[in-house]
Image: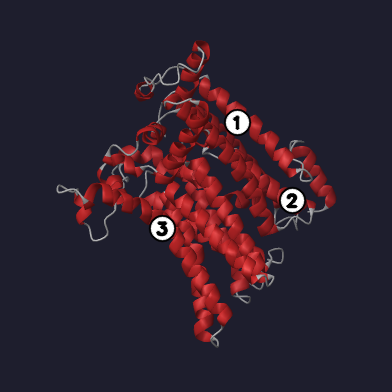
Amino acid sequence: MSSSTYAGWRAANRPSILDPARPVRGLTIAFCLWKVLVFLVIVSCPGLGYDTSTSHLYHDPSGSDVIPEDIEHLLLTIPRKFVRWDSIYFVHIAQNGYVFEQEWAFGYGYTQALAHLTSAIQHFTGWGGEVILAIEAILLSHIAHYLSVLALYRLSVNVFGNDTTTQRLICLLSSALHIICPAGAFLSAPYGESLFSFLNITGFYLYSSAYLDNKNGKRLSGDIKSVLSAVLFCAATTVRSNGILSGILFAYDASLQLRRVVSQSLSLNACAHLLVALISGCIIASGLILPQYLAHIAYCAENTTSRPWCQWYVPSIYGWVQSHYWNVGFLRYWSLSNLPLFVLAMPMLAILCRSSFWALDMAVPFIYPRALSGIDHASSSATTASLLLRLAAPQGILALLALTSYHVQIINRIASGYPLWYWYLVYLVSGNWGQIPPSIQHSRTFKSAVQSMVAYALVQATLFGSFLPPA
């Protein structure tokens, strides 16, 4: 993209706050403006819809001795607008622990984070009860979402660089898309999506930093960052089980190192990297195993009338609860009554799949240099292509699982923690990563995508605040 083309595009398409020279300032302003808008939409919604479950959470007067009556009334009203659907479970679990078996479908890591945060605040301030817990959860979601926006910017810099204005613009636009992504109200409410996005994207950032360090010969630094990224992926897995898909990164690395060990002379360096990849994979797996182990102790170890899942070859309360209580399983959601939800999810599924194949397409010339010799891929560096290839698999498998085995509509919110599709949308407007002017059609596609995301998020916030489906 020439300087004149960029200047024209900048004047016509980009708000002045999104200045590539001051990315943190621009993203912070955009984030605050968007969050205020979503907040106002939610709190302005009328009534509780057809479900009054939220009202049953607010009978605990434990904070009434500390909070003035007028403020207490306000604090009762606003959180009720945000505690909807699954967040009712999250708040209840954080306050009371896992009382009912079906509650084990909801992320252990997120509920424990809320519980410990609430305990600490109550210790220092004396404020307690579900209302205060809900407010803390709302603040946690906002903070985690903001930090994940900044983490996505740093990850984008690692993948694409920031030496030129165009590169900085790519990084900035990708992060801005994360602010207005279709997860919308779920990134503001007491849900695990914000915390998952922060942990998963920051894990990708550390992983990409480790890749760059290893490429530059900083082996020790690279190995340390690899293990730290695995710790973050482990924490993300305790929040949402699909975090386990990030383990594919280390499975891929382990296969590369194993091939080096087998095909070349035995190398201490290759063996060390293989060991780091295996350890990292085990760390991530522990994020899925630990909650299952705790549930097994609670329901199976000292219980003479144990539950059916206790007898499974690999006991899993999560698998049992999802199947038995929530009807989650292969093609179980494929029914005529759910067709509108598939229609709702199809745009995001299409973007996830298309961007995954796009990443593979960008990487092919570097894997098989002669395969596409007639196509211009000069703008894609080997580093960028390699990282895109690694991130394509977790996102692509997530889309496939959502289509075949999940409640498909949740893909609109859980996709928020995966960076690849943001980059693909920016690719549509930036052309071949800024080396050629973008086509008019691609610019229109990007503009339509942004407009659709904003419209969807605002409609979703209205439905969410009114306790109306879909969720």
Amino acid type assigned to the residue bearing label 3 in the image: Ser
Which residue appears at 52% of the width and 21% of the height?
43
Q: Nearer the observer, disc 3 or disc 1?
A: 3
Question: Which residue is nearer to you in this view: 397 or 237?
Answer: 237
Residue under pointer 3: 286
Dot 2, crowdedness within 10 Å: few (<14), some or many (≥20)? many
Seen from the viewer's position, the closer of residues 97 and 360 is: 97
At label 1, the amino acid type is Lys
CA distance separating discs 3 and 2: 37 Å
Q: Splitting the image into 4 quarters, where does residue 161 fall?
A: bottom right
What residue is rendered at 56% in x and 26% in y?
39
Checking the image for residue 119, the label placed there is: none
Q: Nearer the viewer, mark 1 or mark 2?
A: 1
- Give the SS element for disc 2: helix
**Left or right: 406 in relation to 8:** left
Distance Cα–Cα, label 1 vs label 2 = 24 Å
Residue 2, image x and y in percent? Answer: 82, 53
State the quadrant of the C terminus. top left
Q: Position of residue 346 (x, y in %)?
A: 46, 45
Residue found farthest to the top: 70
Say whether residue 362 is left or right of residue 399.
right
For the point 84% across and 48% down, which residue is it? 4
Q: Nearer the viewer, residue 147 or 355?
A: 147
Of helix, strand and loop, which one carries label 1? helix
| Residue that sits furthest to the bottom in the current view | 265
* Image mark count: 3
Label 1 vs 2, first from the N-terminus: 1
The disc placed on residue 35 is: 1
Indicate which disc residue 168 carries.
2
Query: Residue 167 occupies which quadrant of the picture?
Result: bottom right
| Image position of 335 with respect to 436: above or below | above
Observer-side mark, 3 or 2, equals 3
